[in-house]
Image (cartoon, rainbow, N blue to C red):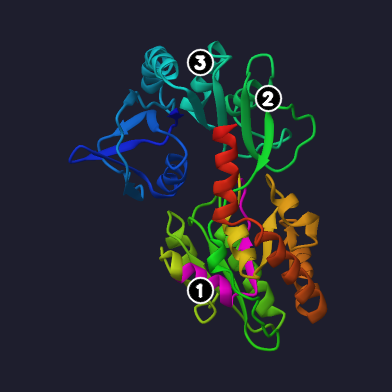
């Protein structure tokens, strides 16, 4: 089978070898196991532009190169008009050459891919919608268009669309899916954590306004004011780092809030294993991998009610759904910390749920999709 992957994710060539975003490459390695050949339709960047990239470890025989574009200025809007027609032509050629079409959405390329796939109703197709599938979410028009086309069984045929969460009014095209980080052989017995000693919180993600790390710090600040012995470790980098450092200094939180920067997978895993809670006060998510990873090691999730988070937390039974009101959210955390039975129950439920989603299960589900 010749699998075509249509994606906004760019290739960066070094010595004629393609490199791509590291987590994306990890998924490609899994897909490559179950097909004869993978061909690509995606843009090319001359530089990595700060993207964490990895060499694609298998041969790429065919790459249909797209023009990358955005509409952040009038000039770019003018260019994008012509680039769209060029990209549609390239997408048509690429899809014609494939046995199975796999779209990566949402994004500008994803939208064009959704349109072009309509003229190939008989080809096997899958799409991974990595954003928020919630039909009530406030999203750009292009995102809403992609969701509408993919959900429409007249326009989009022979397609399985992988989305995060179970949503009402979904058609037969839509399949609830997940992402996995850890394997079966990494599983450990749930360790004991003591609430009588220092209580550990962890935040993992980019230090940007969208991920809202400041709110995580303010929660810790509020708990300290209430007399709790707590610690917050933040892992990640981003444009908000200077603001966070200034806030930590201003509020005299240097002894309990730590900005650790980007760290390896093993360091992050060790942090999850020691933490009582994992915090993600994000404004938007697809599959919040950080929450699933923390839960895998028994860290109770504290997260906003976005995307599939309410399903993951079983609407609060497996964690805390943030109201984004400091007093109310501190009260929720207080209710768990003061009662060890509640803490252990939520922790066990979180751990048991996440342990279902291993890389082995993920691979088995991907194989079913491709060979169906």
What residue does disc 2 label? 151
What residue does disc 1 label? 270
Between discs 1 and 2, the one toward the N terminus: 2
Quarter of the image for residue 301 reads bottom right
Distance from disc 1 to disc 2, alpha carbons, whole Å, reads 40 Å
Q: Report the residue at 51% width, 74% height from top.
A: 270
Judged from the image, the secondary structure of the residue bearing numbered disc 2 is helix
Using a 10 Å C-alpha cutoff, classify the residue at mark 3 as few (fewer than 14 neighbours), some (14 to 19) or many (20 or more).
some
Check if residue 277 falls in the magenta segment: yes
Judge whether residue 246 can be spotted in this image: no
Residue 296: x and y, percent? 62, 65
Check if residue 346 falls in the magenta segment: no
Tag of residue 116: 3
Q: Report the residue at 43% width, 55% height from top.
A: 238
Q: Is residue 13 or residue 184 the one in the foreground?
A: 184
Stretch in magenta: 267-285
Asked if 354 appears above or below 229 in the picture, the reply is above
Residue 338: x and y, percent? 79, 80
Asked if 350 appears above or below 114 in the picture, the reply is below
Residues under numbered marks 3 and 1 in contact, where contact means CB atoms less than 8 Å apart: no
């Amino acid at each position: 089978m010749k699998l075509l992957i249509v994606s906004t994710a760019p290739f960066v060539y070094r010595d004629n070898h393609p490199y791509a975003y590291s987590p994306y490459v990890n998924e490609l390695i899994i897909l490559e196991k179950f097909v004869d050949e993978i061909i690509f339709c995606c843009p090319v960047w001359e530089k990595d532009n700060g993207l964490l990239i990895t060499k694609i470890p298998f041969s790429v025989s065919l790459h249909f190169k797209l023009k990358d574009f955005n509409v952040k200025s009038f000039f770019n809007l003018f260019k994008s008009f012509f680039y769209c027609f060029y990209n549609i032509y390239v997408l048509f050629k690429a899809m014609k050459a494939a046995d199975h079409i796999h779209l990566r959405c949402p994004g500008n390329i994803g939208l064009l891919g959704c349109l072009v796939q309509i003229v190939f109703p008989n080809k096997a197709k899958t799409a991974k919608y990595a954003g928020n599938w919630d039909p009530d979410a406030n999203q750009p028009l292009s995102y809403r268009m992609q969701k509408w086309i993919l959900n429409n069984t007249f326009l989009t045929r022979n397609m399985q669309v992988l989305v995060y969460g179970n949503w009402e009014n979904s058609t037969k095209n839509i399949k609830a899916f997940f992402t996995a980080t850890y394997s079966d052989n990494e599983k450990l017995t749930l360790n004991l954590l003591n609430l009588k000693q220092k209580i550990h919180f962890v935040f993992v993600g980019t230090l940007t306004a969208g991920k809202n790390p400041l709110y995580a710090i303010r929660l810790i600040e509020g708990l300290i004011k209430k007399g709790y012995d707590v610690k917050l470790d933040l892992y990640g980098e981003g444009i908000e780092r200077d603001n966070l450092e200034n806030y930590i200094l201003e509020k005299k939180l240097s002894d309990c809030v730590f900005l650790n920067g980007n760290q390896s997978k093993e360091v992050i895993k060790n942090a999850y294993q020691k933490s009582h809670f994992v915090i993600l006060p994000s404004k938007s998510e697809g599959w919040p991998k950080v929450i699933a990873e923390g839960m895998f090691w028994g860290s109770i999730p504290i997260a906003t009610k976005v995307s599939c988070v309410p399903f993951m937390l079983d609407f609060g039974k497996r964690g805390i759904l943030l109201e984004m009101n400091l007093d109310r959210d501190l009260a929720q955390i207080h209710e768990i910390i003061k009662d060890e039975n509640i803490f252990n129950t939520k922790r066990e439920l979180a751990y048991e749920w996440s342990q279902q989603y291993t890389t082995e299960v993920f691979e088995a589900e991907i194989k079913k999709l491709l060979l169906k």
